[in-house]
Image (tube, rainbow, N blue to C red):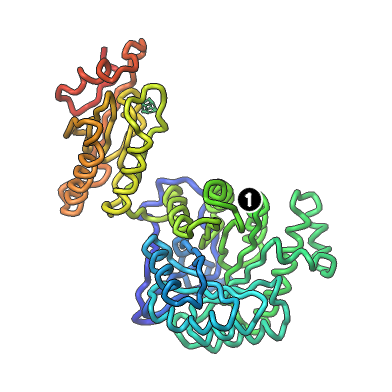
């Protein structure tokens, strides 16, 4: 592996700020090559563990997604992969249902610089062809490629491949594709008894029995370059399945909620499951699945990891108030406009607050590097606690962005540090005499103090 660069993700530099269950240790897999860099997934088993691989700690959780277009349409597929990589995807998966799809892989790999996974169902030869093309990882579904000889052939092909970091295989069971085997497995019946008190016991027993049976084929070949997934559309099943699998198998876990629906509802379902698992130390790579543009999958996956302080944030973190009866500007539009501008123009992880008023705004924007407090068709802009401008509503976006860009340069030059100074908070007026009118509230307090003394009377 000498000479390969290790690509992002980077873990946060100070994880001590978050109280969460430590990451579960597993065997580590590595995917990629000299073109793409190496993405490590999982790791950290103690040296005396039979599956230990020498990795000292779990790698930062990576974000995966999948292209939505046809893989054999090379130009569009490459363009989509570039778009997903630009959005922050660490790994991109492509479907290869037909030979013309695997035939396109070599050229796709040639034109891209992110590790590519071939998603194989039903036809084991697609896996062999993808390995031949130099793909970085294979996903097999035990529910539709079950033949022992065929699986063994794929394993041997991955073992024999000399390219890059080797070719790991994800064993991905899905709720929908394993049910038909439910009456055939003795081990499954045993496990059914183990989980008899469990709400999802029947399904868990099927999933675990299938994984045990399938992994035996890999172990027989001394192949341990494995990741596991066990997806469902039900967030509670996903939480239960991965929690159980994490205890039973020493392999890294690819976690996700399958067919979660459109972004609007799939987001909640996915974050409920993935957030719970990650906060409990379970999960080494994530894929959020939406019936929407996969860019959203990447953006939301990253935001989830940033929110849990599991990855170093890239770009600005936007804080915005939900608005209430005190609002006197179009804050919803302003917030969306600010979000888009920050995404395209700000690279340092500054905190930016867009608040509807000066009543609760300062408290809710505490810790922001750059903040605007809107009022009566105006906005007051603060940079690290110092008031720098009062502008009309129509100028807020432009002025705020200008301050953010200037602040970014000051951070880059070392003149200031992120989060160094905060907006100072004085509790709101306990007598409730400030009312809700911006002029009444703010005029006095705009006279020069860098501190927003909202509670003054
Ligand atoms: S910042 Fe002001 S407008 Fe926004 S929710 Fe809080 S009190 Fe309401």
Give whichever of 182, 222 is nearer the camera: 182
Q: Position of residue 438 (x, y in %)?
A: 28, 20
**Residue at horizontal 43 percent and vertical 72 percent from the top:** 76
Q: Residues within 10 Å of mark 1 (few under 14, many from 20)?
A: many
| The C terminus lies in quadrant | top left
Q: Is residue 213 above or below residue 281?
A: below
Task: Work out whether residue 453 or residue 402 is closer to the camera in this orientation and state it.
Answer: 402
Residue 333 located left or right of residue 222: left
Whether the residue carrying mark 1 lies under 8 Å from ligand 1 is answered with no
Ligand 1 image-quadrant field: top left
Q: Quadrant of residue 157?
A: bottom right
Q: Is residue 447 above or below residue 11?
A: above
Looking at the image, residue 57 sits to the left or right of residue 394; the answer is: right
Seen at 36% across and 53% down, the residue is 313
Asked which secondary structure carries label 1, the reply is: helix
Residue annotated with mark 1: 235
Nearer to us in this view, 18 or 239: 239
Q: Position of residue 432 (x, y in %)?
A: 36, 12
Q: Is residue 280 visible?
A: no
Name the residue at 43% across, 47% down: 307
Answer with the quarter of the image where residue 436 lies: top left
């Amino acid at each position: 592996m000498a000479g390969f660069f290790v690509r992002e993700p980077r873990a946060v530099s100070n994880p001590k700020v978050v109280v969460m269950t430590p990451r579960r240790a597993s065997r580590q897999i590595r995917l990629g090559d000299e073109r793409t860099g190496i993405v490590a997934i999982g790791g950290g088993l103690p040296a005396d563990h039979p599956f230990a691989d020498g990795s000292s700690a779990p790698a930062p959780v990576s974000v995966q997604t999948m292209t939505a277009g046809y893989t054999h349409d090379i130009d569009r597929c490459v363009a989509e992969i570039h778009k997903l990589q630009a959005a922050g995807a660490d790994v991109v998966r492509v479907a290869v249902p037909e030979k013309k799809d695997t035939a396109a892989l070599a050229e796709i790999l040639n034109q891209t610089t992110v590790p590519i996974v071939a998603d194989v169902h039903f036809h084991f030869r697609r896996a062999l062809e993808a390995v031949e093309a130099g793909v970085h990882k294979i996903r097999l579904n035990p529910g539709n490629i079950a033949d022992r000889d065929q699986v063994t052939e794929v394993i041997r092909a991955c073992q024999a491949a000399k390219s890059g970091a080797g070719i790991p295989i994800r064993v991905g069971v899905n709720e929908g594709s394993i049910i038909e085997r439910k009456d055939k497995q003795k081990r499954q019946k045993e496990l059914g008894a183990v989980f008899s008190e469990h709400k999802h016991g029947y399904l868990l027993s099927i999933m675990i029995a299938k994984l045990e049976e399938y992994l035996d084929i890999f172990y027989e070949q001394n192949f341990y370059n494995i990741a596991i997934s066990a997806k469902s559309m039900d967030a509670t099943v996903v939480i239960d399945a991965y929690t159980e699998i994490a205890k039973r198998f020493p392999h890294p876990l690819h976690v996700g909620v399958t067919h979660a629906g459109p972004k609007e509802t799939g987001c909640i379902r996915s974050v409920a499951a993935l957030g719970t698992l990650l906060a409990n130390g379970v999960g080494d790579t994530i894929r959020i699945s939406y019936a929407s543009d996969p860019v959203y999958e990447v953006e939301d996956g990253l935001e989830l990891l940033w929110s849990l302080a599991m990855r170093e944030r890239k770009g600005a973190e936007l804080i915005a108030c939900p608005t209430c009866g005190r609002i006197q500007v179009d804050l919803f539009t302003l917030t969306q406009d600010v979000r888009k501008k920050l995404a395209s123009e700000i690279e340092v992880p500054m905190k930016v607050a867009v608040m509807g008023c000066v009543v609760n705004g300062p408290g809710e924007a505490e810790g922001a590097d750059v903040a605007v407090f809107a009022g009566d068709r105006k906005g007051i802009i603060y940079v690290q606690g110092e008031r720098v401008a009062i502008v009309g509503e129509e100028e807020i976006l432009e002025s705020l962005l200008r301050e953010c860009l200037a602040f970014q340069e000051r951070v880059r030059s070392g003149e200031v540090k992120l989060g160094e100074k905060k907006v100072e908070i004085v509790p709101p007026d306990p007598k409730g005499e400030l009312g809700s009118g911006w002029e009444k509230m703010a005029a006095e307090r705009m006279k020069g103090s860098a501190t927003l003394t909202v509670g003054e009377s």
